[in-house]
Image: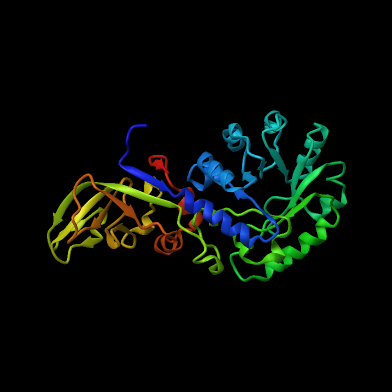
């Protein structure tokens, strides 16, 4: 690959440590990993290999093309959360992954094809994917070999009554279905405690440095570290403006570095006037608006020259507050122009 002026440094040790921390919090339950959206933007292959080496055995992607991209790794248990469409059946029957059936029609399709063991998603109140109580009553899951019966918490990142309501509904529905394992908790669900762990937890965002609940603060380490190269250093005189629409005007002569980084790389315009670069413990404030490919930061008093690399402040909880975007969007929005290293 041709060297790019933008790189994403990925910390494999932090990723593995986050999984181990979540595994400990999961108690006696197995701890899996959500790999969907190309490993939340960090590279599904890299994430899968790192976590498999750490001891993870259960992996989840959203679609069959995602599963196919990881097939050569031979992961112990790879599941496809969005089930099986008619278009997916040939690939699904090849055995590269196990479908998570979400509808009565998917269940019928899998059963009629003699597809073997499967996972099943129940809808316990999120009204997104999953079979409901009426489907169970109608025998939608009859004669299926179900490995893991799961549901998904809608509000685990909040202290919401919906959490216990969903848990209760999940327990009640699971009593009507024969399955080897039960799984309910996502990252935030792991932090809710052992009552939500069941047999298998399925963290996502917390693996990658996200902190969806305060209980995980100080437990989860940053994994993604964007770094951008300085394209130009310039002096902006007092009274002159930087960037589109002149939203920042220099109060005094200011040394400014122009970095190869912008909203095309997932550094959203919400960071304008709020984000920062980092240099040897110093914070270099972002000046003016984020544009498609460029940002400007204040380097007054710092030895920064053209060609240097600066780290971007990408601590996910802090970056979410700065940008107004969710921690999930910040990760999955990381663009394709990064050199991904680590």
Left or right? Give the position of 27 relative to 114.
left
Q: Quadrant of residue 75?
A: top right
Left or right? Give the position of 195 relative to 211.
right
**Which residue shows up at 47% across the image and 48% down it?**
12
Comparing 106 with 16, the one in front is: 16
Residue 262 showing in the rendered view: no
Residue 292 rendering spot, x and y as whole percentages: 33, 46
Residue 326 rendering spot, x and y as whole percentages: 49, 58
Comparing 12 with 9, the one in front is: 12
Q: Is residue 134 above or below residue 217?
A: above
**Which residue shows up at 62% across the image and 43% down it?**
62
Q: Quadrant of the C terminus?
A: top left
Q: Quadrant of residue 278?
A: bottom left
Q: Quadrant of the N terminus?
A: top left
**Which residue shows up at 55% across the image and 41% down it?**
49
**Total marks placed:** 0
Comparing 29 with 136, the one in front is: 29
Left or right? Give the position of 299 relative to 91.
left
**Which residue shows up at 62% across the image and 71% down it?**
159
Left or right? Give the position of 117 relative to 253.
right
Residue 23 showing in the rendered view: yes
Residue 256 rendering spot, x and y as whole percentages: 20, 55
- The figure's colour scheme reads rainbow
Residue 58 rendering spot, x and y as whole percentages: 65, 46
Comparing 259 with 181, the one in front is: 181
């Amino acid at each position: 690959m041709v060297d790019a002026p933008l790189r994403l440094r990925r910390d494999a040790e932090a990723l593995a440590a986050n999984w181990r921390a979540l595994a400990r919090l999961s108690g006696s339950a197995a701890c899996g990993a959500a790999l969907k959206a190309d490993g939340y933007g960090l590279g599904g292959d890299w994430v899968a290999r790192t976590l498999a080496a750490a001891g993870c055995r259960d992996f989840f992607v959203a679609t069959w093309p995602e599963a196919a991209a990881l097939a050569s790794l031979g992961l112990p248990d790879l599941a496809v959360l969005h089930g099986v469409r008619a278009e997916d059946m040939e690939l699904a029957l090849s055995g590269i992954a196990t479908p998570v059936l979400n509808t009565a029609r998917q269940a019928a399709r899998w059963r009629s094809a003699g597809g073997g063991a499967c996972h099943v998603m129940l809808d316990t109140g999120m009204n997104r994917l999953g079979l409901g109580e009426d489907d169970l009553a109608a025998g939608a899951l009859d004669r299926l070999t179900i490995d893991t019966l799961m549901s998904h918490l809608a509000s685990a990142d909040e202290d919401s009554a919906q959490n216990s309501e969903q848990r209760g509904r999940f327990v009640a529905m699971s009593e009507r279905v024969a399955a080897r394992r039960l799984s309910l908790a996502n990252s935030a669900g792991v932090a809710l405690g052992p009552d939500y762990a069941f047999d298998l937890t399925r963290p996502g965002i917390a693996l990658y440095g996200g902190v969806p609940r305060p209980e995980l603060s100080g437990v989860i380490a940053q994994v993604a570290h964007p770094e951008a190269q300085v394209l130009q250093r310039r002096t902006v005189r007092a009274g002159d403006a930087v960037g589109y629409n002149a939203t920042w005007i220099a109060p005094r002569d200011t040394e400014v570095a122009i970095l190869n980084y912008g909203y095309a790389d997932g550094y959203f315009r919400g960071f304008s006037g709020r984000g920062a670069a980092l240099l040897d413990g110093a914070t270099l404030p972002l000046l003016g608006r984020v544009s498609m490919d460029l940002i400007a930061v204040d380097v007054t008093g710092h030895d920064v020259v053209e060609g240097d690399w600066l780290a971007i402040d990408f601590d996910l909880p802090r970056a979410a507050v700065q940008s107004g975007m969710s921690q999930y969007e910040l990760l999955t929005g990381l663009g394709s122009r990064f050199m991904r290293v680590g």
